[in-house]
Amino acid sequence: MADAPANLSYRQSHMTDETISTERPRRGFFAGASAQIGLFAIVALLWVIFSTLAPGFTSPINLFGIGRSLAVDIVIGFSQMVVLATGGMNLAVGSIGVCAVMLTGFLLQDAGVPIPVALAGGLLLGGALGWLNGFAIVKTGVNAFIITLASASLFLGAMLILSKAVPYNTLPPEIGQFGRMRLWGYVSPLIFIAIAIGAALYVLYRHTLLGRQILAAGANPRAAEMSGVPVGRVIIISHTLSGLLAATAGIMLVARLGAAMPSVGGEDWLLPSFLGPVLGGTLLAGGSVAVIGTMIGAALVTTIRSGLLVLQVGNFWLQLFLGLILLAAVMADRYRGVFLERRSLGRR
Amino acid sequence: MQLSIESVSKAFPGVQALDKVSFELRPGEIHALMGENGAGKSTLIKIITGLYRPDDGRVTIDGQEVSFQSPRDAIAAGIGAVHQERNLIPRFSVGENILLERLPTRNGLLDKDAIHNEARRYLDLLDRGIDTHTEVRSLSVAQMQIVEIAKALSLETKCLLMDEPTASITEHETEALFTLLKRLRDEGASIVFVSHKLEEVFAIADRVTVLRDGKNAALGEPMSTMTRQKLISLMVGREEHIVNKPQRTVETGTVLEARGLKTSFGHRDISFLLKRGEILGLYGLVGAGRSELARAIVGAAPVTGGEVLVKGKAADIRNVHQALNQFRIGYISEDRKNEGLILTHTIRENIAVTIWRRLAGALGLIRPSAELDAVMPYVQRLEIRAPSVEQKVGNLSGGNQQKVSVAKWLAANVEILIIDEPTVGIDIKTKAYLHELIHEIAAGGTSVLLISSDMPEMVSLADRILVMHDMRLVGEVANDRRYETVSNAIMNRIHAVEEERSTAATG
Amino acid sequence: MNSLLRRFLMVEWSGILAAIILGSALLAWLSPAFLTEFNIYVMLRSFCVALLVGFAQMVTLAVGQMNISVGALGGLVAVLAGGMMEKLGVPMILAIPAAIAIGALCGLLNGVLTERTGINGFIITLATASAFTGINLGITQSIPFYNMPPGLVAFGSDRFFAFPYLMIAPIIATVLLGLFLSRTVPGRHLLAVGGNPHAAELSGISRGRITILAHTLSGTLAACAAILAVAQLGSAQPTIGSDWLLLSFAAPIIGGAALTGGHVSVLGTTLAVILIALIENGMVLAKVDPYWVQFVLGALILAAVWLNRWRAVKTGTD
């Protein structure tokens, strides 16, 4: 009660059974996570199916491959999730990612700077481009969709003009070695980077001032602004973070491929970037995030991609599957909501 | 038309909005529907207009049971409505808006002449000054309301439902509307009239149905048997009681000063002083520019000239964030749903939003237990009723929502609090409670700028009253708590300014 | 002079018109090839598909929705039309209407899914876009259908002086769409729902039906664009539509459409497409890197939204 102002006299309120008790509500780790449990069950089911149909699915080399792509997919999902939290979106994640990829490649191969400096350069560019998006959105007041649609084209165009679309193939060997590194025979260290980022984001949204402000600004920007939340700043920070994460995903991809290619990222990231967060239960309307859900959502995407590959179903049908899964997920979520509403009414 | 609602019920998650409510509308009558916010009025209206379907009960028209699936069905069944929310298409012309769902065509294409001639007929019943070709977005709020009413009239239905039709129009226009409604009634139309203003209900209604807590408190009582006190007691379950707070002497130190303030809304020459622990009233009619001034002071809208001084030092406040953290000024918005609260967040989060900065420790981490400790005293003190602090604010009643939006600014522990229309749409019990609270926080040394268009509220609470009219301060009235003299003094100031202007215009 | 300029800038499509005139004059002065009959024909031909793509997005913007699947839908329709004509030997006169009908159905599907589920149209059409592309690639394995009926190919390449016959289709579409939006009841209702969905619903307009109508129309227009693209290329490429997304938004938005719905401009969109065609043509004539087109288009959208914003602030409407 130290925070209570001195001028307030605490009248003993006559508590009715309707008034709120001081008892602290328990907030379990899985509170409100039923969607995520369902999603997890689907992923598990797919693993059973794929490993039964194709024994190669659980081979160490395939597990290693899944882990590597999963790590990248998770970070791509996060880069979208952090702007979805503000009620915006970032269609430029792929463009920012590839810009970071090519700058890192240039710094490593042509400029010959030390590896940490090159990586920092790539990340910095990602953050800077994200900041530009955020700045343009806040200053013009135009919605994030159109700004990032335009900037995606702008960034990609600029990258292609500057790089002439020539890949950087002769990077220092350490990069490729890191990408090929296997712990205990089948685990890629990249996955730990993704998990660490996930943990940091979890803490950010659950337990920090900035995280709370982001969610408040996402849920109702006007109310947040009128409550003293610096909404503009929060949106710019979120976009910067998104750019930074997109760059991280890009650099992880450089490690995986052992080269910096201008063909990665771009529009190819668009669908996966939304799939993870949306499957995981992040609302497009803003004001909510699902960090663990995004990771499971990304796992679903990676599993299907790898499973179809192992089953030798043409990669051509992958897109159809992903589209149908996204549709099924959003619709299932919708009808689950309707069901819950009915049930809560029935109880009365 | 004979419209009967027979013991209709409707529930939403967490609330029984209507519990076996009945309502009966006869041909050729004006039937007032009354009740406090949260009493179930708007739910009933939405059932009549086809937006909601009842869980239980019957709706009959001329003895035939009906079941509306959408507003289209209700309109087809002969029910026209003026809704409380603005329901016009900004980029369409007045004419198109009036005839929106049945635009006349010739050879498959719209017949523009027919649209404007037809719309003109209905608009002329109310106001000849509005051109049917104007785009709605360039009309004033009052003109838009007139267009809304014309739109409902144009349906030529035998049943007309008017939800707060006079909320934004002038007295003169209200009179014209009432004359028209009476004429329609005499021609046999059935009219449901919803209003908060008792005077209007007494002026126009034949019978009244009152809802309280989702139940019938009165069913079709003739107005001739009603008194003001009786109607209020039906609405609140007890009699209205306006208690005047005792007059106080205010401390001397000035905490907020405006010097010749100008804003982009058109405010000019705004100068006033707010002293420590004072309740300074800011009275004005709707549209006088009070909320806009408040927004400019807290930095939510640009100040274009003059200066604001906080504790004697010039303060350039550019956003609410700065107002709160640097100058300790808070603003409780009148627009709870859009500006005051985050409806999808919990009570805890809504109250704590102003103090997160203070709660955050190293690395910006917020401890959940510290947050709860900070929030609980206010939840208890304001007697916010909900199953838990983790309840979403969107599921609370209007009165409890307002308590949450007040609680969050009390928690912020600001020195200057601007309170904008704190009791609009609030039940009388909560209203009395909030009055008590405002008085109490001022007594504790917080300076309050109270914006209200509720005259009894103003007279009961304020120490001094500033009068605002058309973006200017036109006078200051000392408040001796004598309702007649104070309210007359205020209205005289406003009329005097109006008169000056008309003489200046003609001379 | 200043105030005259200001008033000119207030007209929505004024900026685009000025840019077109200025750009044409500049190109005519810099490059002698610009005003040749053949170059004008090339430019007009490239304008045809782009305009229909822009319209396909414009109708969804009008109702306050968006359609991420325009390109994927177009690609699917193109390969289905090509497949029907080449593999199944369906005559052109049947295959084309059938393919357009499939496009309309895909649009209808978008509309019904958005409407029935109440889920954001962005995410629904993102999903269907992926599904349409998947079917396209699954059927074709990325191999185009090359044997198109000569009549269709001729329609796509023949010309009357500088006027390509291909352009007949977009001209008809422009007139019909203009009439539809300004002078018919469903057209007005479409804009009403975009302008204020709640109000439209309370006025007795069926918001669901109108949303579905807009998506169906969008699908139909995208399908028409796809058929034109097949005619223009002389083959049914599975990649048709893959680069339409940006263009589809660029045209209506540069043309002054409100992103929030309820306001679009057929004339503005048309001028915007002319401007884009002009820029692309200028880049080709100047022999600059083709990547510049992408860069400039992005910059152009940003400039347009900024100008629209400025105008909104100046006129005090938001």
Image: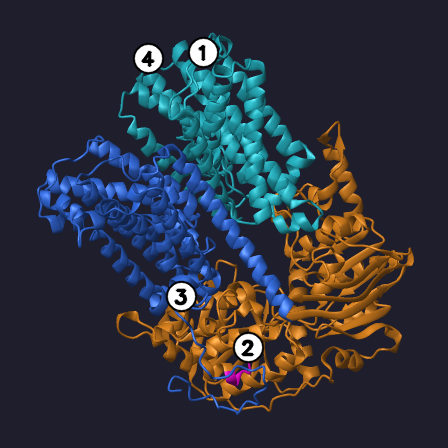
In this rendering, the label closer to the viewer, 1 or 2:
2
x and y percent of residue C172 in the render?
58, 21
Which amino acid, mark 2? Pro
User: Is A343 in front, or is B181?
Assistant: A343
Query: Which chain is displayed in orange in the rendered image?
Result: B
In the rendered view, tell whether residue C273 sits above or below residue B339: above
Kindly identify which residue carries mark 4.
C32
In the rendered view, tell whether residue C200 sits above or below residue A202: above
Kindly identify which residue carries mark 2.
B387
Residue B383 lies within the magenta run: yes
Q: CA distance from mark 2 to mark 4?
A: 78 Å
Q: CA distance from mark 1 to mark 2?
A: 72 Å
Which amino acid, mark 3? Val
Q: Residues within 10 Å of mark 2 (few under 14, many from 20)?
A: some
Query: Which chain does the residue under circle 2 lie in?
Result: B
Q: Residues within 10 Å of mark 4 (few under 14, many from 20)?
A: few
Task: Give the residue at x 77% y 58%.
Answer: B161
x and y percent of residue B272 in the render?
49, 75
